[in-house]
Image (cartoon, rainbow, N blue to C red):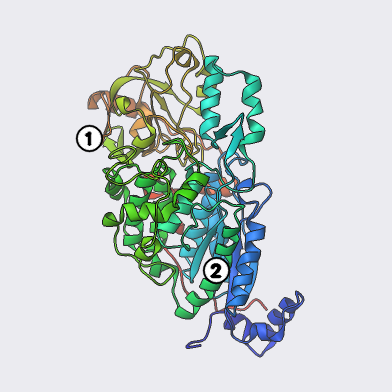
C-alpha cells in the first residue's frame, strides 16, 4: 500500500471514534482484519421492488461482493433512492437530481475507498454517475441488464415500442382490446430493463462505450449467468482501481464523451442520453454543449433494434453487443481511457459480429446519417433535438400549421376528438412540459397521433415540445425545446394556426411569425404559477437548469473532493 487509504480516517484510528465505527460494523460479523487497511468498497444499490427494472440488483450485489473479497477488499452495500421509470409520478426525471444528491452525500459521508454503482432503470444510471462524479472516488458501473424478449402468439414483443404500436392499432380498429390486454402478461418476462434500445439499455451501452464498466455490460440479459460473472469481475477490478488510485475523473474525459455520442448514433440510442451526458459533463468539469452532439449527426444507424428496427436486446447481445458496434465505428472513436486501465480499443479489438441483420457493417448501414440532430431557430434559440433513426424521412423536412396544446391536461382531453382541426400536415405543439413547467420534463413529447388521423391510416405527424420522450418511442418528434415555455421561451408564444418550418438536415426549427407580432405576444405573456410550493419539487423548480444544460440543479454543477474532517461524536 503506497499511501494511506481514505477509509482509514474512519476505521484506522486507535481512539474513541475509531472504536465506535469498528465496533458497530463488527455486529455484522466482520473480523478484525477487515479494518487492517485493506480497501473498503461501497456497493451503491438502487434495488427496489418499486423499480422492476432493478429487481435483480440484490443478486448482482452478491456477485460484486464475491469479487471484492476475492481481490482482498471489504464490500459494504448501501441503498440509495431508486427511480422506477414506469411507476413514479409525475416523472422519474424530477428525481434524478435528488438521487444524485443521495449518492454524492452517501459516498462522501461514509468511509469507502471506491464504489460500484448498481443501476439500470433509466434515471438511476445517470443519477448515480452524477453523484459519484461530484465526489470523484474510484468508480465502476454494473447495470441490471435487459429483461428477456417479450413473447405473444409466436412473436417477439418490445417494451414500450410495441405498447405504443398496439395502442395505435386499437385506435385504428386493427387490434381488439382483448388482444391488447393479452399482450400485457407476455411483455415483461423477467427482471431487467426494457429489452428495446430504450433509455436504460442506451445508458448501460454508453457506460460501456465510455469505458466506465467492463465489456458486455450494455447487453448481457439480466438473468444470464454471465452478468453475475461480470459483477464478480467488477468487484475484483474496483479493488485494483483503488490500488491504482484511478478516479472517475481519470476516465470521464472529453474523449470518452465524444465516443458516447458516436456510439449513441450507431446504436440508434435514446434522445434522453443528451440531457444525461450534458449533466454528467457538468459534474466532472468537461466542456460539453448541445452543439457537440452534431458529432453523431452523419453517423449511420448500424443496430437493428426497436424502436429504430425490429430486434431486441437479447438479439443484440448474441450478435456481438457493444464491442461489435465499437469495432464498426472504430475509425471514428477517440483514444480514451477506461476503468480497465487500457484504451477503449481493448474493448473491441477481438470483437466479432455474429448476425449482420442485427448489427450492420459501417459500409452497409441500416440507415445513413441517422444520428441525433440539433435544431435551432427562433422557436428554439438554445436548441432542440430530433431522432432521425426513429422518424419518418418525409417529415424531417416539413412546413405546416401548428395546433397548440397549452398543457398535458388539454392534450389528453382533446387529442382524440373527432372534430380536432388537424390533418397529416399539421404540427402538434405541446407547452409547459419542460424542467420547470411540469415539473421534471416528462416523457410526453411523443404526443399520440390524433385518433381521427389514425383511422385514416396516418401513423406519424410532426410533434414539437419542451418535453422528452421515452427511448422506446418513435416518430418525427422534436424535443427538449429550450428555453421551455414556462421559462418564457419562444415556444410559449406559439398559437394555433402559426406556421412552423422544420429542417433536420439544415438544423432549423423556425416559427414563421414576424418579430413584431412575437413582441406583441411577449408583452402579454405571464409566467405560470408553480405547481409545487414546498419541499424538493419547489426547490427543483427554482434551481433546475434548462435542457440544453442537462437539467441539473444549478448548485450541483461541479464537484467537491475535500475530505470530511469533522467527527460526529
Q: Is mark 2 on a helix, strand or loop?
A: helix
Q: Would you say residue 279 is visible in this rendering? A: no
Residue at figure coordinates x 40%, y 40% from the top left: 357
Residue at figure coordinates x 52%, y 58% from the top left: 128
Q: Is mark 1 on a helix, strand or loop?
A: loop
Residue that numbered label 2 is attached to: 233
Image position of 143 with respect to 472: above or below: below
User: Which numbered marker is on residue 506?
Assistant: 1
In which image quadrant can residue 42 be found?
Answer: bottom right
User: Which numbered marker is on residue 9?
Assistant: none
Q: Quadrant of the C terminus?
A: bottom right
| Residue 358, horizontal then vertical, whole percent | 42, 42
Q: How crowded is mark 1: few (under 14 residues within 10 Å), some or many (20 or more)?
A: few
Residues under labels 2 and 1: Cα distance?
46 Å
State the residue in front, 361 or 208: 361
Q: Do the residues labelled 2 and 1 touch (CB within 8 Å)?
A: no
| Residue 392, horizontal then vertical, whole percent | 35, 28
Amino acid at each position: 500500500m503506497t499511501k494511506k487509504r481514505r477509509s482509514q480516517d474512519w476505521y484506522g484510528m486507535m481512539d474513541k471514534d475509531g472504536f465506535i465505527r469498528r465496533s458497530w460494523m463488527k455486529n455484522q460479523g466482520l473480523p478484525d482484519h477487515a479494518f487492517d487497511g485493506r480497501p473498503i468498497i461501497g456497493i451503491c444499490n438502487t434495488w427496489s421492488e418499486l423499480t422492476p427494472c432493478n429487481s435483480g440488483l440484490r443478486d448482482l450485489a452478491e456477485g460484486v461482493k464475491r469479487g471484492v473479497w476475492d481481490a482482498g477488499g471489504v464490500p459494504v452495500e448501501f441503498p440509495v433512492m431508486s427511480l422506477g421509470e414506469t411507476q413514479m409520478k409525475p416523472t422519474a426525471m424530477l428525481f434524478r437530481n435528488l438521487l444524485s444528491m443521495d449518492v454524492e452525500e452517501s459516498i462522501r459521508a461514509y468511509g469507502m475507498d471506491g464504489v460500484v454503482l448498481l443501476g439500470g432503470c433509466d434515471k438511476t444510471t445517470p443519477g448515480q454517475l452524477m453523484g459519484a462524479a461530484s465526489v470523484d472516488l474510484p468508480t465502476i458501473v454494473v447495470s441490471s441488464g435487459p429483461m428477456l424478449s417479450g413473447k405473444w402468439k409466436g412473436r417477439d414483443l418490445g417494451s414500450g415500442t410495441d405498447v405504443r404500436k398496439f395502442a395505435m392499432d386499437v385506435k385504428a380498429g386493427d387490434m381488439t382490446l382483448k388482444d391488447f390486454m393479452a399482450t400485457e402478461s407476455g411483455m415483461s418476462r423477467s427482471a431487467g430493463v426494457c429489452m428495446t434500445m430504450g433509455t436504460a439499455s442506451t445508458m448501460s451501452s454508453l457506460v460501456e462505450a465510455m469505458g466506465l464498466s467492463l465489456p458486455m455490460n450494455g447487453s448481457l440479459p439480466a438473468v444470464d449467468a454471465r452478468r453475475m460473472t461480470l459483477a464478480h469481475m467488477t468487484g475484483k477490478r474496483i479493488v485494483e482501481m483503488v490500488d491504482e488510485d484511478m478516479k472517475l475523473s481519470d476516465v470521464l474525459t472529453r474523449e470518452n464523451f465524444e465516443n458516447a455520442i458516436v456510439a449513441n448514433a450507431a446504436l440508434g440510442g435514446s434522445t434522453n442520453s443528451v440531457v444525461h451526458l450534458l449533466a454528467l459533463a457538468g459534474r466532472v468539469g468537461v466542456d460539453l454543449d448541445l452543439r457537440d452532439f452534431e458529432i453523431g449527426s452523419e453517423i449511420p444507424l448500424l443496430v437493428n433494434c426497436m424502436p429504430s428496427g425490429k430486434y431486441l436486446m437479447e438479439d443484440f447481445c448474441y450478435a456481438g453487443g457493444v464491442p461489435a458496434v465499437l469495432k464498426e465505428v472504430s475509425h471514428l472513436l477517440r483514444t480514451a481511457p477506461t476503468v480497465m486501465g487500457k484504451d477503449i480499443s481493448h474493448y473491441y479489438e477481438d470483437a466479432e459480429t455474429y448476425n449482420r441483420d442485427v448489427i450492420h457493417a459501417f459500409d452497409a448501414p441500416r440507415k445513413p446519417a441517422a444520428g441525433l440532430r440539433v435544431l435551432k431557430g427562433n422557436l428554439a434559440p438554445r436548441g432542440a433535438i430530433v431522432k432521425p433513426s426513429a422518424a419518418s424521412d418525409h417529415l424531417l423536412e416539413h412546413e405546416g400549421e401548428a395546433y397548440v396544446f397549452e398543457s398535458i391536461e388539454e392534450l389528453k382531453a382533446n387529442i382524440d376528438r373527432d372534430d380536432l382541426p388537424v390533418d397529416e400536415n399539421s404540427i402538434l405543439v405541446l407547452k409547459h412540459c419542460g424542467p420547470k413547467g411540469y415539473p421534471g420534463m416528462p416523457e410526453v413529447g411523443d404526443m399520440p397521433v390524433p385518433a381521427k388521423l389514425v383511422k385514416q391510416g396516418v401513423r406519424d405527424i410532426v410533434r414539437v415540445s419542451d418535453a422528452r420522450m421515452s427511448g422506446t418511442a418513435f416518430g418525427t418528434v422534436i424535443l427538449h425545446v429550450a428555453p421551455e415555455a414556462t421559462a418564457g421561451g419562444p415556444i410559449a408564444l406559439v398559437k394555433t394556426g402559426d406556421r412552423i418550418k422544420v429542417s433536420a438536415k439544415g438544423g432549423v426549427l423556425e416559427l414563421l411569425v414576424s418579430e413584431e407580432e412575437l413582441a406583441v405576444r411577449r408583452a402579454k405573456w405571464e409566467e405560470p404559477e408553480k405547481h409545487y410550493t414546498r419541499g424538493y419539487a419547489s426547490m427543483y423548480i427554482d434551481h433546475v437548469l434548462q435542457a440544453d444544460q442537462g437539467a441539473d440543479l444549478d448548485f450541483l454543477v461541479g464537484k467537491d473532493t475535500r475530505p470530511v474532517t469533522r467527527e460526529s461524536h
